Image (tube, grey):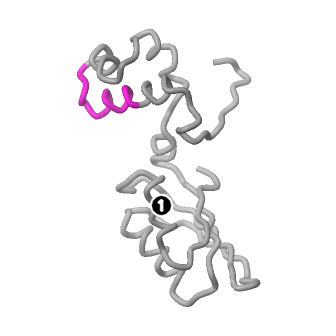
Amino acid sequence: MSLDAKYYIVEASALPEVFLKVAEAKRLLSSHEAAAVNDATQAVGISRSAFYKYRDAITPLQNMMHDRVVTFQFMLRDEQGLLSNLLNVFAESGANILTINSIRPTDGTAIVTISAETRNVSRPLEELVDSFNEIYGVLRSQILAG
């Protein structure tokens, strides 16, 4: 990569299939489901040259965020107990809350930003965000930074 490398967060469905297969091959290798690069590339249906060409160019968001501080932003209804429900999801997942910031509710909604250490999170961050969105009263949740 050049010294002027730029990075983007892109939804998986927008990526060429080869990138997804390279990411899967890397997962197979790191989980020891494949013993060697040749085994991993055969399992996902790509050439070894494609694997070596793109292996440093793609990393799943979860791997990038592990052992880091991640900042989440939420739009919440102004309802009693909702923040407590969010914090319970963080606790159950193993995240360590570092900061909580809230903007005073207006028009029945509040913006809350929570920074958490993700070292001990027990599931992919995408699943964690999905679980926040399942809580009644959470209008939107997203990862801002990590």
Q: Residue at x 45, y 41 (%)?
A: 63
Relative image position of residue 96 (x, y in whole percent): 45, 64
**Residue closest to the far right:** 106
Q: In the picture provided, is 75 more to the left or to the right than 127? A: right
Say few, some or many: other residues with alpha carbon within 10 Å of mark 1 (under 14 / 14 to 19 / 20 or more): few
Task: Tell me if residue 117 is in the magenta stretch.
Answer: no
Check disc 1 and report its element: helix, strand or loop.
helix
Indicate whether 53 appears above or below 100: above
Q: In the picture provided, is 96 more to the left or to the right than 107? A: left
Indicate whether 53 appears above or below 23: above
Q: Quadrant of residue 71?
A: bottom right
Q: Residue at x 53, y 82 (%)?
A: 82
Residue at which label 1 appears: 130
Foreground residue, 110 or 64? 110
Relative image position of residue 113 (x, y in whole percent): 63, 68
Indicate whether 110 appears above or below 74: below
Q: Quadrant of residue 137?
A: bottom right
Point out the stretch of residues depicted in magenta. Answer: 24-35
**Residue closest to the far bottom:** 80
Q: Residue at x 55, y 25 (%)?
A: 57
Relative image position of residue 44 (x, y in whole percent): 35, 24
Q: Quadrant of residue 13?
A: top right
Quadrant for the N terminus in the image: top right
